[in-house]
Amino acid sequence: MKADEIYEDVIGRCTAVRTLRAARVVTRLYEDALREVDLTITQFTLLVTIGRAKPESISKIGEYLSIDRTTLSRNLKPLEKAGFVTRGAEGEGRRREVRLTRAGLTKLKQAYPVWLTVQNRVEKELGGDEVDDIAVALHRLHSVESILH
C-alpha cells in the first residue's frame, strides 16, 4: 500500500483522529467561555462530579470520568488550593473522601450559566437528534472499553 493511500484511509476513517479533533474543538468552546469564571472544563466537570457523586475516593472519580489517578490528582490540586474541594482523612484502604466545599458550590453556581450558554450553543448547532446520537455512541464506546479492561 502506498503512503498516500494510508494517509487518506486514516484521515478519512480513523475514529480516534475524528474524535480527538472534535474533542479539541468542543473543549476549546467551553475553555474559552469558562475562562471568565477562572475554571477549565475539566475543573468544572470535577466540581459537578464531586458534588453529585460524593465519591469515597479519588479512584472513584477517575472511574466516573475515565481519568487516570495522576492526571486527576494534578487537576484536583488547584481546586483544593482554591478551597473548592477538600479531601478527608485517609480511611480504609488509603481512601480519602473528596467533597465539594461551600466555596466550590458557589463557584459551580457562578460557572453554571456560562456552561449552559455554551451547551445550548453546541446543542443548537448540532441539533437535538445529533447530540443524542453522539451521547449514545460515546456511551457504547465507554461500554466497550470497560469490557476490554
Image (spheres, rainbow, N blue to C red):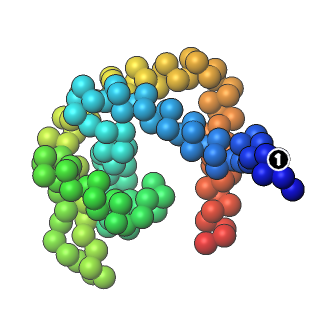
**Residue 26 visible from this viewpoint:** yes
Q: Secondary structure at mark 1?
A: helix
Q: Position of residue 73 (x, y in %)?
A: 29, 62
Q: Position of residue 27 (x, y in %)?
A: 45, 36
Q: Nearer the viewer, residue 20 or 148?
A: 20
Quarter of the figure that contains the N terminus = bottom right
Judge from the rendering whether residue 102 lies leftward or rightward of residue 68; answer left or right: left
- For badge 1, the amino acid type reads Glu
Judge from the rendering whether residue 56 lies leftward or rightward of residue 38; answer left or right: right
Find residue 47 and report its image quarter.
Answer: top left
Residue in the image at 46% along x and 62% along y: 63
| Residue situated furthest right in the rendering | 1
Residue in the image at 37% along x and 66% along y: 69
Q: Position of residue 26 (x, y in %)?
A: 49, 33
**Residue 52 visible from this viewpoint:** no
Residue in the image at 82% along x and 47% along y: 5
Judge from the rendering whether residue 43 lies leftward or rightward of residue 66; answer left or right: left
Vertical placement of residue 30 versus 78, above or below = above
Quarter of the figure that contains the C terminus = bottom right
Find residue 22 and report its image quarter.
Answer: top right
Vertical placement of residue 126 versus 50, above or below = above
Q: Nearer the viewer, residue 20 or 52?
A: 20
For disc 1, the neighbor class at 10 Å (few under 14, some 14 to 19, many from 20) is few
Q: Nearer the viewer, residue 47 or 2?
A: 2
Q: Nearer the viewer, residue 91 or 145?
A: 145
Q: Position of residue 76 (x, y in %)?
A: 26, 55
In this figure, what is the number of numbered marks?
Answer: 1
Q: What residue is disc 1 on?
A: 5
